[in-house]
Amino acid sequence: MMLSIDWQNETLHQALKLVAAYALALPVGWWREKQAHAIGVRTFPLVAMASCAYILVAVPLGHPDIAAQSRVLQGLVAGIGSSAAVPS
């Protein structure tokens, strides 16, 4: 019984983190949409939620070593940066 409650609590906690990532990225996307940029209100929250989900899945499954977690974050930032640098 206790395991079920802990699992549900952890799932709710992770879902709230995804909602927070969406809520924090939405104003940036809205502002970019208002300024007529190509990447706007749909893309920014989607990338924020995907990045948050990737970290929520990758970090606990990896080594408890801080350096390993840092490499996961570094790869995520490099991936987003390289895709943003491609001219459209």
Image: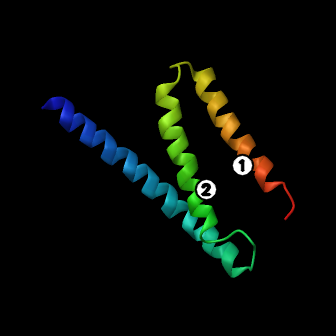
> Residue at left 50%, top 45%?
53
> Which residue sits furthest front?
88
Q: Compared to 72, does 40 lie above or below? A: below
Q: Compared to 60, does 36 lie above or below? A: below
Question: Mark 2 and 1 residues: CB-CB less than 8 Å, in contact?
Answer: yes
Horizontal side, residue 25 vs residue 38: left or right: left
Q: Position of residue 23 (x, y in %)?
A: 49, 63
Q: Position of residue 62 (x, y in %)?
A: 52, 24
> Residue at left 75%, top 74%?
37
Q: If you read the primary sequence from the N terminus, does the residue marked by circle 2 or circle 1 appear first?
A: 2
Identify the residue position indicated by label 2 in the image.
47
Q: Mark 2: which secondary structure?
A: helix
What is the three-letter code of the residue carrying label 2?
A: Val
As measured in the structure, the alpha-carbon distance from the residue carrying label 2 to the one carrying label 1 is 9 Å
Identify the residue position indicated by label 1 in the image.
80
Q: Residues within 10 Å of mark 1 (few under 14, many from 20)?
A: few
Q: Compared to 82, does 41 lie above or below? A: below
